[in-house]
Amino acid sequence: MVKQILNIRIMTKSFKELKLPDFIVNTCRKIGLNTPTPVQAATIPQILSGKNIVAISPTGSGKTAAFALPIISKLSEDPYGIFCLVLSPTRELGEQIRDQFRLFGAGIGITVSEAFGGLSYNEQALIIEKKPHVLVATPGRLLSHLKNATTVSFK
């Protein structure tokens, strides 16, 4: 296995320059995000071009938007069925990720659901059966749903 680490310094002036759709650019502007952070500028174009990315960046540097914005951009091209599964190590981080997807995806009306421990298993199962666009889950709860589900598939 070959491991490649890139240290990319990109100065991007706006989210528009990252080739994101207008509804995302407008949402960013409305919430006061006018300039991409370094992790966003480095990763968003790579993700939009189909590359897999592993990014390490400090807390509060915009990592969630760095992966959520290009995912929402691609989803807007064909919003059908479960498009994205985001695994989170904790419920608390999962809730933050879910909220970011809802905020940035509001412009196209994406559905974002969660599968975390501590919430009603049966209610979650019903929501997952409806195939939200984005499912944010903790590994244990997702595994439980996959073992017990009859129609949910991530093929």
Image (tube, rainbow, N blue to C red):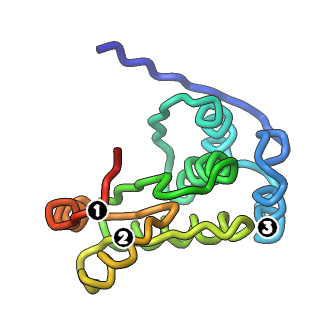
Under mark 1, the amino acid is: Thr
Q: Which residue is mark 1?
A: 151
Label located before the other in sequence (1 or 3): 3
Q: Is residue 72 left or right of residue 116?
A: right
Judged from the image, the secondary structure of the residue bearing numbered disc 3 is loop
Q: Residues within 10 Å of mark 3 (few under 14, many from 20)?
A: few
State yes or no: discs 1 and 3 in contact (Cβ < 8 Å): no
Question: Quick one: label 1, few (<14), some, or many (20+) residues within 10 Å?
Answer: few
User: For the residue carrying disc 2, how many other residues have a C-alpha within 10 Å: few (<14), some (14-19), or many (20+)?
Assistant: some
Snapshot quadrant of residue 122: bottom left
Image location of residue 27, percent across then percent down: 78, 65
Mark 3 and mark 2 lie on one chain; the one further toward the N terminus is 3
Q: Quarter of the image holding residue 103?
A: bottom right
The spot of residue 17 in percent (x, y) is 83, 39
Q: Is residue 113 above or below residue 26?
A: below
Residue denoted by label 2: 129
Separation of marks 1 and 2 at Cα, in angstroms: 7 Å
Q: Residue furthest front?
A: 151
The answer to the question of whether label 3 and label 2 lie on touching residues, with beta carbons closer than 8 A, is: no
Amino acid under disc 2: Glu
Element type where label 1 sits in the image: loop
Mark 3 lies on residue: 32
Q: In the orientation shown, which residue stands out farthest toward the top?
A: 2
Whether the residues at callouts 1 and 2 have beta carbons within 8 Å, the answer is yes
Q: Amino acid at mark 3?
A: Gly
Give me the residue at 78% from left, 35% from top.
11
**First reached walking from the N terminus: tag 1 or tag 2:** 2
Kindly identify the residue that appears in the image at 57 percent across and 64 percent down. 101
